Image: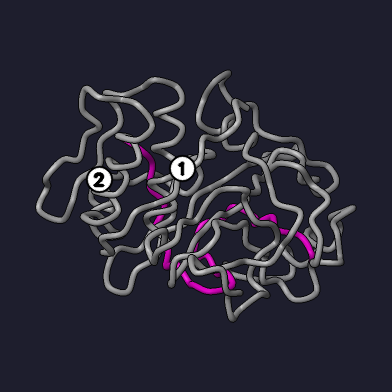
Amino acid sequence: MKPNLLMAIILPAFLCLDTQQTAVSKKTGPFKTDLSQNPYPFIGSIPLPAGYRRVREPANGFGEWLRGIPLKKDTRVRLFDGTLKANQSAQFAVLDLSVGKRDLQQCADAVMRLRAEYLYLRGMYDDLVFYDNIGHPYRLGSNRDRRHFDRFLEGVFAGCGTLSLQRQLKVTRWDQIRAGDVIIRGGSPGHAMMIADMAVNESGQKIFLLAQSYMPAQDIHLVVNPDPGSPSPWYILREGPVQTPEWLFPSGRFRTWP
């Protein structure tokens, strides 16, 4: 991957498309229809479809932390050099996180970035480890100030990618995923996205949000549901492939952290 430096910031403490998906998604609201400005301050404030409630997350857990990530008012996705991404139709909202000044924070990098920020801010240093393609571990070490943490991230992003991250993660069943889990297809090219939030209705049907970066390095953003005509970013959880705006994941691609 890319030997570049991430300009990290400290976060606040904070498919198969079918008639069923179309019917549910068109009941959602009150979602914004003007995509030029985002009215939702953080992930956990994005409204739910009628009849759904957010899945309860453990206090101080990864899922709860993800819900507290702030969102930018500007819904445009920018690349690492400040220019606008060519495709501005994939995102629902943009996470208020730095992307850096170089072509670094791509798909797997964004997933590892979110996980690393959570562990670092919670002081869970022993869990802060990623592996490259030959199994070499990247650990923070004994110096844990922010400058050294940023250097640690630099090494992770330079040495790790979708293939190594897929090997590190554990396979999980589609009906057992939780916020913070990953959908991934390792390779070159490959892609990885994070489950950013989940909700459930009275019948047990679950829905979820997906966050991604892409190539070249760009803002981490929540993607829309490509169901035509729907402003909802929520995906219905079901067995089978997952179609996102810029990638199709085959069945069985959900992973969880060891």
Given residues 37 and 191, the one toward you in this image is 37
Q: Is residue 231 visible in the rendered structure shown here? A: yes
- How many neighbours does mark 1 have within 10 angstroms: few (below 14), some (14-19), or many (20 or more)? many
Local SS, label 2 = helix
Residue type marked 2: Gln
Q: Is residue 177 visible in the rendered structure shown here? A: no
Q: Which mark is residue 46?
A: none
Image quadrant in which the C terminus is located: top left
Q: Give the vertical position of 95 relative to 119 (above or below).
A: below
Quarter-of-image position of residue 144: top left
- In the image, what residue occupies the spot 76% across and 40% down? 45
Residue 95 screen position, x and y as percent: 62, 50
Given residues 1 and 228, the one toward you in this image is 1
Local SS, label 1 = helix
Which residues lie in the magenta part? 231-258
Q: Left or right of 106: which side holds 236?
A: right
Residue 49 screen position, x and y as percent: 81, 49
Image quadrant in which the N terminus is located: bottom left
- How many neighbours does mark 2 have within 10 angstroms: few (below 14), some (14-19), or many (20 or more)? some
Residue 128 screen position, x and y as percent: 30, 32
Q: Left or right of 19: which side holds 57?
A: left
- In the image, what residue occupies the spot 25% across and 42% down? 130
- In the image, what residue occupies the spot 38% across and 32% down? 146
Q: Which residue is mark 2?
A: 168
Given residues 153 and 226, the one toward you in this image is 153
Q: Which residue is mark 1?
A: 114
Q: Left or right of 48: which side holds 179?
A: left
Residue type marked 1: Leu
Residue 29 screen position, x and y as percent: 87, 53
Q: Is residue 113 magenta?
A: no
Label 2 to label 1, Cα distance in Å? 16 Å
Name the residue at the right extreme. 30
